[in-house]
Amino acid sequence: MLKTKLSLAALLVSVSLLSACGDSTTNIVEKDPIANDGDDHDHDHGDISAAGRLAISAKDSNLVSVYELENGALLHTFAVADTPSALAASASKRYALVVQRTTDRVEFVDGGLFQEDHVDHLHDYQQAPALSSFVLSDSRPTHITSNDSQVAVFFDGDAASGTPAALAVITDADITTDSNGYPVLHYSTHMHGAAQARGEYVLSTIRDANSATTLPDKVGVYHAHDDHFHEELVFDELCPGLHGSAQNEHVIAFGCTDGVLVINQQDATFTASKIANTDDFSGTMRIGTLVGAEHAEHLVGFAGASMFAIHAEDGEMELVDWQGTEGASLVGYGFADGGEKFVLLDSLGYLTILNYHGHEHGHEHEGAAEEPAFEIAGKVQLTTADVSTMPEDSRFELAISASDDKVYVANPIDNTLLTVDIADAEVVATKQLSYVPHKLVWLGIAAPAEAHAH
């Protein structure tokens, strides 16, 4: 079973790790922390950061720092158990999931900005960042996906030790309360899998234990029952070499070697179909990464550096000419500016900004059916440095704000953090870091209460 509460031995190990850090400390503070006297409802209500905060991990280190984006101040640096392999945001963007794949662990850093529903109004809160006591522990946490209320954490398991895969679906409330009652799906074999949470359901991959590959080729629907899942349905449609998944309001999709498996949900009914690869695919090209947003009609699929707009409900897949730089690979991407734009960060240090025209609610105009879903809005050169000087095992890294039109890029060549305004397609701020940045993630309140009031 996945472990969220540390044993006494684990706690002692954790304390010894923290103590051993010496001057690389867990409480580096350049700005006085926002006061928190222990009363959960007595936080600083004034001047709550609309820009949000950023969590950044240091390369080859167990340190994760949280910055205030309004003024660039370092709020706190935390020592986690091991070097993070990835950072991801929780469903509400309050917490950073600090994934430590090789040591079978996910820790959580509370960014300190969150919102509560007070029935007749939404209320924003601001407090100091903190390292949460909530921990997930199972074999090889790898794929993290989320919707606006849940996060699915897929643990691949380990072939060498015979450890099977597992899946946990958690909410921000689980993290906040240090719960151990969230549902967990235990498999009988390992796999490099993926999952998408859908309320009381989760759609997750299935692999034949006798398969020669670690990649699954089927998808099942599972229904949550307290702390576990029951299998409801396994789709007949195969998805060979399955890798990558995404969802929007109506559909869930998984990347396959021969196309995209699309699953439509109508209440508790799920149906599957396949969108075949188009003539734009050649050789070993396949969709291996998918990106979605709740109210975007299109999913975005990537086959290497090739981008495809996938209208799943219409069964259409179209190549997007994003005018990528020759020889560049993609290292970051995602919907931005409330879904109005899509950004692509490449390995040569260029950020490409696309306008998106395929929203479900509004944004259409006469003739819109004939215009492309994505079109070039701008391209920003982020560095003039020789990219061949990039440190080994480093790359440019991207974090996207959920509250405004900014994105953030970490540059390990010169250890800087760049703020990019994607409305004006320009770098508007550069912050020098005292370490080589590794991973980063945006944390904050996506829709501040005052925005709802207006």
Image: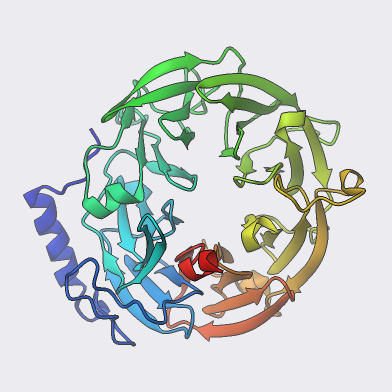
Q: Residue shown at 49%/74% (left/top)?
A: 50
Farthest left residue in view: 8
Q: Is residue 125 visible?
A: yes
Which is more toward the observer, 181 or 268?
A: 268
Q: Residue shown at 29%/74% (left/top)?
A: 128
Vertical position of residue 426 compared to residue 320: above or below: below
Which is more toward the observer, 202 or 348?
A: 202
Q: Is residue 331 visible?
A: no
Q: Quadrant of the N terminus?
A: top left
Vertical position of residue 262 compared to residue 152: above or below: above
Q: How is the image coloured?
A: rainbow
Q: Quadrant of the C terminus?
A: bottom right
246 left or right of 383 in image: left
Farthest top residue in view: 236
* Residue 80 image position (x, y, % from top left): 27, 62
Q: Quadrant of residue 73?
A: bottom left
Q: Quadrant of residue 37?
A: bottom left
321 left or right of 14 in image: right
Which is more toward the observer, 36 or 324?
A: 36
* Residue 32 image position (x, y, % from top left): 29, 87
Q: Residue shown at 38%/43% (left/top)?
A: 141
